[in-house]
Image (cartoon, helix red, strand yellow):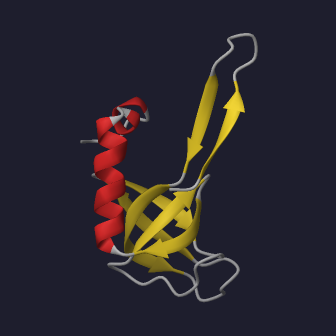
């Protein structure tokens, strides 16, 4: 699961930025640079840019970071990632339905 750590100023702690898996529901646009999708994240749907994953199709799972699908992953990997994020409380912390 791609991530990087960012120091929280003055706290001595780190905040982690995650790429979260989601399932592509619908596609929008024909131009690969501006193609987007409606992506389902545990019941929450958001529009996501597919510039880095033009091969994504409805039903595929993609890793999304800051509004961009950065790679396709298989459903087993998506489910393992959901379970891990749920176990560490990251889904609840980010407001995703679990």
Residue shown at 64% from the left, 26% from the top? 14
Quadrant in the rendering for residue 36? bottom right
The residue most toward the top is 10
Residue shown at 61% from the left, 30% from the top? 15
State which quarter of the image contains the C terminus. Answer: top left
Left or right: 23 in relation to 4: left
Left or right: 79 in relation to 69: left
The residue most toward the left is 98
Q: How far from the left and from the top, in percent, is residue 73?
A: 43, 73
Count of numbered tags: 0
Left or right: 60 in relation to 20: left
| In front of the other: 26 or 67 | 67
| Residue 91 appears in view | yes
| In front of the other: 77 or 34 | 77
Quadrant in the rendering for residue 69? bottom right
Q: How far from the left and from the top, in percent, is residue 22?
A: 39, 62
| Residue 44 appears in view | no
Q: How far from the left and from the top, in percent, is residue 80?
A: 31, 58
Residue shown at 28% from the left, 49% from the top? 83
98 in relation to 26, above or below: above
Q: How far from the left and from the top, in percent, is residue 40?
A: 35, 60
68 in relation to 9, above or below: below
Left or right: 35 in relation to 90: right
The residue most toward the right is 9
């Amino acid at each position: 699961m791609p991530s990087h750590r960012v120091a929280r100023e003055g706290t001595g702690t780190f905040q982690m930025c995650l790429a979260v898996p989601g399932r592509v529901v619908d596609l929008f646009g024909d131009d690969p640079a501006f193609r987007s999708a409606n992506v389902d994240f545990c019941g929450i749907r958001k529009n996501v840019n597919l510039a880095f994953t033009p091969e994504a199709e409805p039903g595929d799972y993609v890793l999304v970071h800051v509004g961009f699908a950065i790679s396709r992953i298989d459903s087993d990997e998506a489910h393992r990632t959901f379970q891990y994020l749920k176990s560490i409380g990251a889904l609840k912390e980010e407001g995703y339905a679990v």
